[in-house]
C-alpha cells in the first residue's frame, strides 16, 4: 500500500492551508526531476533513501520545516545545525540535495524551496521503498540549540514524549514517526558506547539492557564488540532492512529494537496504556501504520509553518543564504 499526499503551503486571503497542486503551474516536472536524481543517487548509495527521510525529520523537528539544516556555517553569522550533536557526523545526503537543487534551478529557477526539496525527497524515498507525504516552508532562522535538542536514541519514553509534546505532536505521532527506522543503518556507538550502551553498561549497571532479547544481544555483541569500532553500521530493522514495512514494530514486540528510544515505545513502564498499544496495533496492521505515518508526517510539517513569504526566501543554493 502506498500513501502519497503532496501538500505545500498555499495562501488564500488571510488564511494559510496545505494544497496538493502548489507547483503544478510553476514547476510541473518538479516531482519527476527529484525522483530521477534520487534513483541515480541510490545506484551508488543504497542508504540514501533512509538518510534523506532522516534529514527531513531533523529539519522539521527544529522550528518547523524550513530547510535551515541545509545551511553551511558562516563564522560570526551562522552556527550551522549540521554541527549539532544529533547531526554531526551522522546526518548525510546533503550532496544529493545539492544535485536536486541544481536540477530544479535549471528547469524552473527560483521556484522550489529548499524545505520542499527535503519534503519531496523524503516522500519519494519512502515511496521508492514503499509509502508517504510533504509540506512547504522557506528559511526562518537557524536554531543550533534546537538542533541539539532533537529526540535522541538513548532517551527514555518520558523525555521523548515531552519533546514531541513541545512541538504539538502526540503519542501516535511519536510511534508512527519512529517507524521510519524500518529502514536505514545505525552505528555501533548508538548501542555499545556511553550514553547509549545497551550491550555492556546499560544505565551505568555494567550489565546489558534487560529488555533486549538475548539472542539479538549476542548477535549485536559480535557486530559491536566492547571498545570496538563505533562507526560500524548495523541494520535498524534486522529482518527487512531495506523495505518500508511494519517489521520495525514486530521487532520491538520481541525485544529486538536496536535503539533505547525504539524499545522504550513498548517496554518502558510508562508505555503501558500510552505507546505500547500503538506499537501492538502497527505490528499487526501495516495499513494502520502507513495511514498514521502519512498523517504524522503532515502533522510534523505543520510545526511552526511559515505563512508570510516576506519572512523567508527561495534559496538558489540550499547551503547558503541568497
Image: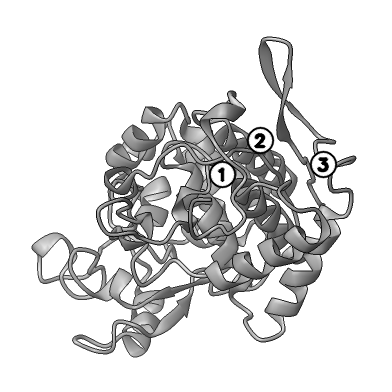
* Label drawn at residue 219: none
Question: Label 3 near label 1: C-beta < 8 Å?
Answer: no
User: What is the x, y in percent for residue 93?
Assistant: 55, 69
Q: CA distance from mark 3 to mark 2?
A: 21 Å
Pointer 1 residue = 176
The quarter of the picture where residue 71 lies is: bottom left
Q: CA distance from mark 1 to mark 3?
A: 28 Å
Residue at 28% in and 57% down: 154
* Label drawn at residue 23: 3
Secondary structure beneath dot 3 equals loop
The quarter of the picture where residue 143 lies is: top left
For the question of whether residue 290 can be seen, the reply is yes
Residue at 33% in and 59% down: 74
| Frontmost residue, 282 versus 188 | 188
Pointer 2 residue = 295
Residue at 67% in and 10% down: 14
29 vs 83, left or right, is right
Labels 3 and 2: the sequence-earlier one: 3
Around disc 1, counting alpha carbons within 10 Å, would you say few (fewer than 14), some (14 to 19), or many (20 or more)? many
Would you place residue 220 above or below residue 128 in this image? below
Outermost front residue: 322
Q: CA distance from mark 1 to mark 2?
A: 9 Å
Question: Label 2 near label 1: C-beta < 8 Å?
Answer: yes
Amino acid at each position: 500500500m502506498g500513501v502519497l499526499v503532496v501538500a505545500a503551503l498555499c495562501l488564500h486571503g488571510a488564511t494559510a492551508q496545505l494544497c496538493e497542486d502548489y507547483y503544478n503551474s510553476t514547476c510541473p516536472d518538479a516531482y519527476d526531476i527529484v525522483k530521477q536524481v534520487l534513483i541515480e543517487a541510490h545506484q551508488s548509495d543504497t542508504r540514501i533513501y533512509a538518510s534523506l527521510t532522516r534529514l527531513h525529520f531533523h529539519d522539521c523537528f527544529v522550528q518547523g520545516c524550513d530547510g535551515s539544516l541545509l545551511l553551511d556555517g558562516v563564522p560570526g553569522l551562522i552556527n550551522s545545525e549540521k554541527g549539532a550533536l544529533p547531526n554531526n557526523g551522522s546526518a548525510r545526503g546533503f550532496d544529493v540535495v545539492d544535485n536536486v537543487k541544481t536540477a530544479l534551478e535549471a528547469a524552473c529557477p527560483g521556484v522550489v524551496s529548499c524545505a520542499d526539496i527535503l519534503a519531496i525527497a523524503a516522500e519519494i524515498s519512502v515511496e521508492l521503498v514503499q509509502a508517504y507525504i510533504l509540506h512547504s516552508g522557506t528559511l526562518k532562522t537557524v536554531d543550533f540549540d534546537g538542533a541539539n535538542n532533537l529526540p535522541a536514541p538513548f532517551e527514555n519514553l518520558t523525555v521523548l514524549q515531552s519533546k514531541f509534546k513541545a512541538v504539538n505532536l502526540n503519542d501516535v505521532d511519536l510511534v508512527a514517526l519512529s517507524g521510519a527506522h524500518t529502514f536505514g543503518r545505525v552505528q555501533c556507538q548508538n548501542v555499545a558506547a556511553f550514553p547509549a550502551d545497551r550491550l555492556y553498561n546499560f544505565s551505568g549497571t555494567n550489565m546489558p539492557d534487560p529488555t533486549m532479547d538475548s539472542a539479538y544481544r549476542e548477535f549485536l555483541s559480535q557486530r559491536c564488540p566492547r571498545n570496538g569500532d563505533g562507526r560500524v553500521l548495523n541494520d535498524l530493522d534486522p529482518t527487512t532492512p531495506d523495505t518500508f514495512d511494519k517489521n520495525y514494530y514486530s521487532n520491538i514486540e520481541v525485544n529486538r529494537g536496536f535503539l533505547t528510544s525504539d524499545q522504550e515505545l513498548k517496554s518502558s513502564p510508562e508505555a503501558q496504556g500510552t505507546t505500547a498499544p500503538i506499537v501492538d496495533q502497527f505490528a499487526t496492521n501495516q495499513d494502520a501504520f502507513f495511514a498514521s505515518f502519512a498523517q504524522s508526517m503532515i502533522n510534523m510539517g505543520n510545526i511552526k509553518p511559515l505563512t508570510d513569504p516576506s519572512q523567508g526566501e527561495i534559496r538558489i543554493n540550499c547551503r547558503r543564504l541568497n
